[in-house]
């Protein structure tokens, strides 16, 4: 399949939008979480997403103004949900991101600096999966 730069740009743009929404969800969830360790984990996740987004947007020379806030975590999630259930729900988005990132890395025309940023994010997500397992035992 021939991948045009426009297709690659569209794919990166979609990943950015998903990660912006995910960052907002982590921030909102950190306000709802009950356990201090879970709150800290979620805040760190939001911070890491923020750094990833800024680095990728900077590399692509994209203004953050081009992405509008549109989703509200509280509307889609139950405030009374357990921290563990909330973590599981939020980290499903990371699993989807992994698939998106791995697909993006298959593009031979993906610029090297973007490839590095994506690979770093994959590592963060995999490490966070291990942290979530540890936090899950705290929530029980």
Image: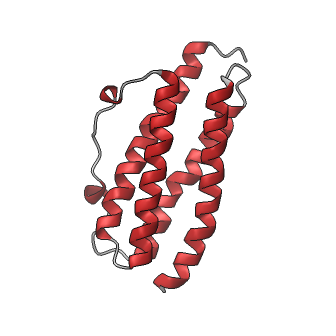
At a point 30% along the width and 69% down the height, the residue shown is 32
Left or right position of 30 against 75:
right
What residue do we see at 58% from left, 77% from top?
134
Expressed as whole percent of the image width and height from the top left, the position of residue 17 reads: 42, 36
Q: Residue furthest bottom?
A: 140
Above or below 14: residue 108: above
Q: Nearer the viewer, residue 67 or 124?
A: 124
Q: Is residue 92 visible?
A: yes
Residue in the picture at 35% in, 30% down: 64
Query: In this rendering, does residue 78 appear at all?
Result: no
Rendered position, 135 above or below 12: below
Across and down, in percent, residue 18 comes to: 45, 41
- Quarter of the image for residue 4 reads top right
Q: Position of residue 68 (x, y in %)?
A: 29, 33
Q: Nearer the viewer, residue 132 or 60?
A: 60
Residue shown at 43% from the left, 53% from the top: 47
* Position of the N terminus by quadrant: top right
């Amino acid at each position: 399949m021939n991948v045009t730069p426009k297709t690659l740009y569209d794919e990166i743009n979609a990943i950015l939008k998903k990660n912006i929404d995910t960052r907002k969800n982590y921030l909102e969830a950190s306000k709802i979480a009950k356990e201090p360790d879970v709150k800290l984990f979620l805040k760190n996740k939001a911070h890491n997403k923020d750094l990833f987004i800024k680095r990728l947007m900077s590399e692509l020379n994209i203004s953050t103004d081009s992405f509008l806030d549109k989703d509200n975590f509280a509307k889609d999630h139950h405030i009374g949900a357990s921290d563990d259930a909330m973590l599981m729900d939020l980290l499903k988005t990371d699993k989807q991101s992994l698939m998106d990132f791995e697909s993006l890395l298959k593009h031979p025309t993906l610029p090297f600096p973007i490839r590095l940023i994506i690979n770093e994010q994959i590592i963060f997500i995999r490490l966070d999966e291990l942290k979530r397992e540890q936090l899950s035992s705290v929530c029980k």
